[in-house]
Image: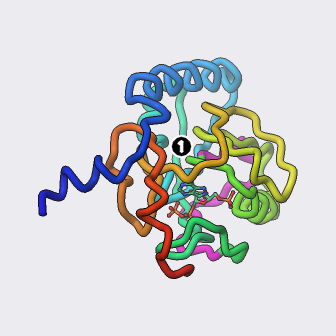
Amino acid sequence: MNQSITLHSDVAQILLTEDEIATKVRELGARISSDYRDRPLTLVSVLKGSLPFMADLMRAIDIPVRIDLMEVSSYGGSSTESSGLVRILKDLSASIVGEDVLIVEDIIDTGLTLNYLIRYLRGKAPASLRICTLLDKPARRLVEIKLDYTGFTIPDQFVVGYGLDYGELYRNLRYVGVLRPEVYSGAPEG
Ligand code: PRP
Ligand code: 7HP
């Protein structure tokens, strides 16, 4: 089977094009550069989903930044529902005590992952802690969280691409699209 045809044909609808994403990332980068103009900033990317967003956002920021990476997981391998159980798979490499920290996420859905992360990172005594997310899906929120920088507010649909996965696939799509429900209906929850 031609893998490339399968990759794109599993997407029912393109929600955000490559150009729309690039324009938004530039806008966010400009705002962040202006807001942190005189303050050394540490970007903390939450892997794996935020990998493309982080890579593009950090290059859209024109002030000095440090970067660090965490990996957490709350969605099972082939699940469209958060397990609610957040696991830290990779912790920060350096101390953030007294640092201005910006968490970089791909999507906030129930908010459970971010809620956990905020508590965890606040415990590491940063000078400030703010949130930047490419996508916000407010319809499914279970915990209220203040987002400081939001790229796009999206409807309650399961999306893939630009880092976002289903069963670890589709992260390499250049756009964000809605996955055909038949791709995941019938898949075991995990
Ligand atoms: C995804 C996404 C967020 C989280 C959002 O991560 O990257 O971190 O889910 O969902 P929530 O608001 O309902 O908690 P996932 O656990 O799928 O890991 P991944 O980034 O490796 O895909
Ligand atoms: C996590 C997640 N991963 C991929 N697509 C979505 O719509 C998602 N919501 N929460």
Q: Nearer the viewer, residue 124 or 114?
A: 114
- State the image coordinates of residue 20 (x, y, percent, origin top left): 46, 23
Indicate yes or no: mark 1 CB to ligand 1 under 8 Å: no
Q: Nearer the viewer, residue 158 or 144?
A: 158
- State the image coordinates of residue 75 (x, y, percent, origin top left): 58, 70
Quarter where residue 30 is shown: top right
Quarter where residue 32 is shown: top right
* Left or right: residue 38 compared with residue 169: right
**Residue at screen point 49% across, 58% down:** 181
**Residue at screen point 53% across, 24% down:** 24
Three-letter amino acid code of the residue under disc 1? Arg
**Residue at screen point 32% across, 50% down:** 172
- State the image coordinates of residue 87 (x, y, percent, origin top left): 63, 76
* Left or right: residue 13 compared with residue 69: left
Q: For the view shown, which residue lies furthest in the right direction?
A: 144
Total labels: the figure holds 1
Q: Residues within 10 Å of mark 1 (few under 14, many from 20)?
A: few
* Residue annotated with mark 1: 66
Quadrant the C terminus occupies = bottom right
Q: Is residue 98 magenta?
A: yes
Is 92 located above or below residue 85 in the figure?
above
Q: How is the image coloured?
A: rainbow
Quadrant the N terminus occupies = bottom left
- State the image coordinates of residue 78 (x, y, percent, origin top left): 48, 73
Label 1's element?
A: strand
Quarter where residue 43 is shown: top right
Is 188 located above or below residue 40 in the figure?
below
Q: Nearer the viewer, residue 11 or 27?
A: 11
Q: Locate ligand 2 by image quadrant.
A: bottom right
Q: Is residue 166 magenta?
A: no
Residue range of the region highlighted in magenta in the rendering: 87-104
Is 35 located above or below residue 1 in the figure?
above
